[in-house]
Amino acid sequence: MRIFLLALLILTSFGQDNTFLIKKRIDVGVLMCKNSSNLSSSVGWQTSASAITISMDRVNREGLLDGVDLNFIFLFDDCIESRAAGLASKLLTESNVSAIIGPTCNKAGLAVVNLAAYYNVPVLTWGLTISSQFINIERFPTTITLVPVSKTVANAVHQTMIEFGWTEFVYIFYEDEKCGYFREDLEAITSESNHTSLTRTVQLYENTYANFQKQLGRLKNVTRIFTVCLPEDGQIKRWFMLAAYDLQMTNNEYVYLFAGPKSTAYQQTSSSGEVVGAWVDWSTTPDGRDNEAKKAFMRTMVIVATPVASEELAEFKKDVIDKMKLPPFNCTTECEAKEYQEAAEYADQLHDTVYLYAMILNKTIEEDGVGQIANGSFMVGKTAGVVFEGMSGLVRMNSEGYRLPNMILANLDSNATQRTVASMDIDTDSVVANAHRLSFLLKILGFLRFGGN
């Protein structure tokens, strides 16, 4: 098993009197995907690992870790459950790490947090780990996650249905390590709702225009309200909406609510620095249907964690790809492959996870000394009140180690510019919605035409 050791040295001090102390080396395990082609675009090592160095640059600038020598030890579980458990055991018993970052998928992640709970070592999850089980502090008291878990997103969808008076809807999804878990929580919440019901769930097995048209055609006379969960690839969403457009399912009778723990909303940000609308075909052979796709997207809404400025995110993505070619990664020949030219969808979360770890490590050392830095259940409590602006948006943590996402409900105005309809502060069991112009939006979108169903 190849082990990549990244030594990041920050030389400042812990002491309140600005005197230098002996540097403390802290080993941190990082479990990632490197040999799984279907995950490279979302959480692959080749397209995201350098987010750690970018994050550490910020840590260094802000002097968060004075006198600390951080060593990141990379191992590759490739989202295989048994391998993740075995490698985590190796990190805990042989490398004696003080924390583990990863894994990036649900089953592998749950295997590791279960093991870490036994050893009482903190685990920080990111990427596709959206299962609501991760925030069960009784089962997993050493787990820290800034991923908006599926239950929080399901609550946001439910609140949206209440605000608009929609009494029933269909959930259509592609299982990509997140949408299935989202379905489970959506079913649980709506089954107890007095306001709306989930009438049908439809799983897509192919992300093609032909399949989208086939499945939507079957639902054309069944429902008017769709909640949709697809991979964050903008072209896939574009094909979906073009299929709806060609079926004449983008008139005033239909609406599509895209939801998930992470959404690119209405813009695509490229590692080359481009920022374009979700309706733009930026393939090497454009189909010439951008205007039709734009019209189709006018019938959509998105639920998304409060995003950073697209230009800032585009620059970050460019840095991720560029820095993978530099030490300590030196990914030159391999990373020249076409599939590694765009930063991973969740690289921003890896950046923020490392920064979050630095913040709680700083807090632990300053308040309690280095003796507690590997005490997982103790460090989880240090997340209380942590707030910062990250690459994945505003990060707010509670005392139980999970993120309280600020979600927005957005759509496009007549100029195809994204606008916020409502903002929602979400806990796992409650939503505080601040509606900006819901009644106005109902009128301009024509939802009253079919009585809100």
Image: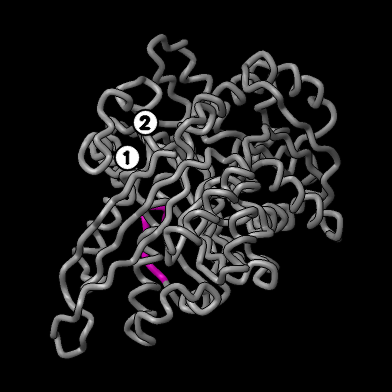
Q: Is residue 391 magenta?
A: yes
Image point 16% across, 68% down: which residue? 11
Image point 34% across, 44% down: which residue? 4
* Mark 2 element type: loop
Q: Quadrant location of residue 273?
A: top left
Task: Residue 291: give x, y in percent of width and height.
Answer: 47, 20
Label 1 amino acid?
A: Lys
Task: Residue 359: give x, y in percent of width and height.
Answer: 36, 71
Image point 21% across, 41% down: which residue? 327
Farthest residue in the front direction? 94
Q: CA distance from mark 1 to mark 2?
A: 7 Å
Label 2 amino acid?
A: Glu
Give the main secondary structure, helix, strand or loop, of the magenta stretch. strand
Quarter of the image where the N terminus is located = top left
Quarter of the image where the C terminus is located = top right
Look at the image and give the residue range highlighted in magenta.
387-393
Marks 1,2: beta carbons within 8 A: yes
Q: Residues within 10 Å of mark 2 (few under 14, many from 20)?
A: many
> Dot 2 corresponds to which residue?
342
Left/right of residue 419 with respect to residue 451 in the rendered view: left
Task: Residue 110: give x, y in percent of width and height.
Answer: 64, 54
Q: Is residue 449 visible?
A: yes
* Mark 1 element type: helix
Q: How many marks?
A: 2
> Dot 1 corresponds to which residue?
317
Task: Residue 264: give x, y in percent of width and height.
Answer: 48, 40
Could you say which is closer to the camera, residue 125 or residue 341? 125
Q: Is residue 64 visible?
A: no
